[in-house]
Amino acid sequence: MGSPPSSSAVREARVALGGRLREIRKAGGFKTARAFAVCAGWSESKASRIENGVTRPSEEDLRQYAELCRVPQVYSDLVATAQNIEEMYVEWRRLHRDGLRPIQEAHVPLYARTRHFRVYEPGVIPGLLQTPAYARSIMGRIIGFWGIPDDTESAVAVRMGRQHVLRDAGRRFGFLMEEAALRSRFGGAEAMADQLAHLLTVSVLQQVSLGIVPMTADRTMWPLEGFWIYDDEQVVIELATAQVTVKQPSEVATYARMFSEPARIAVHGKAARALITEALNALA
């Protein structure tokens, strides 16, 4: 696949995990790594390497920390953290090296198994709600910016194909957008008009909750980067230079709380459709 994912970020994540294990060890009554190592049947150097982020701990190593320090409830969170480190930060250039279609296809299994989607986007319409013309414009700009192979049409086709999950009444979809996403034009006035009309159509689906945060709302949370929560299993965050995936239960729970903040000040139903209609009329 090429060079490893953002080695500095991975290193920082390993150090952070080691620091957390050190705190757990001290809170558990083991003042030194040596004392813990003796109890665990390890060499002192092994405990030191783990706690300094040099060695990635195994699941059994993490079980030892959780059980010997009498905090078995943190074990699952520690395992999720360790498993996620290598994949948590993947540079866009690596993801897009062969064009956009592969990354679109990579998410197909995730969409297929997710029953509850929660999506926050501050400046664009979420991919699940995009029209082909809007998606084509977005993807064309990504391809031009990064100078990657142009596979726009096949990537758009995959994105459109993923949208079949929206018609599944057994799933739930929560979409939150800032009003700015309705006003930011991609693909020209005609493409935006079709996109906004499509939002109006999708917004009445029983399984879809569409919320718009008005620009006039009194903020309790400022706009952040866009993020997608898949069930309670993982969160994908798209930054300017990378895609970040988090799977630690505590972090997923934090993003769920972050989703609930704009949801409280967003408008839904008729009020949301009124804002969409206003943006649509402004295109004339």
Image (spheres, grey):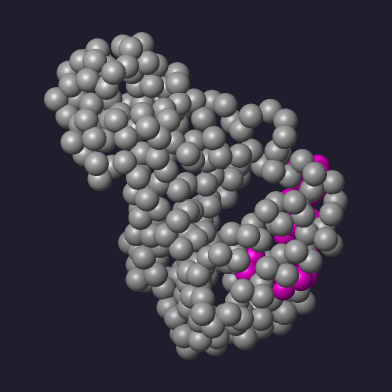
Prevalent SS, magenta region = helix
Q: Residue placed at 47% from the left, 53% from the top?
A: 234
34 is higher (above) or lower (below) than 20: above
Describe residue 244's horizontal placement relative to residue 222 as left or right: right
Give coordinates of residue 48: x percent, y percent.
Answer: 34, 15
Say if residue 186 shows up in the picture: no
Q: Residue furthest front?
A: 41
Count of residue discs: 0
111 is higher (above) or lower (below) than 195: above
| Quadrant including the C terminus | bottom right
Q: Residue placed at 48% from the left, 59% from the top?
A: 229
Was residue 76 drawn as part of the magenta stretch in this picture? no
Q: Quadrant of residue 151?
A: bottom right
Was residue 131 drawn as part of the magenta stretch in this picture? yes
Q: Residue placed at 49% from the left, 75% from the top?
A: 172
Give coordinates of residue 210: x percent, y percent.
Answer: 50, 77
Give coordinates of residue 118: x percent, y percent.
Answer: 48, 66
Say if residue 149 shows up in the picture: yes
Q: Nearer the viewer, residue 236 or 132?
A: 236
Give coordinates of residue 248: x percent, y percent.
Answer: 40, 46
Q: Which residues make up the magenta segment?
A: 126-148
| Quadrant including the N terminus | top right
Q: Nearer the viewer, residue 217 or 128?
A: 128
11 is higher (above) or lower (below) than 159: above
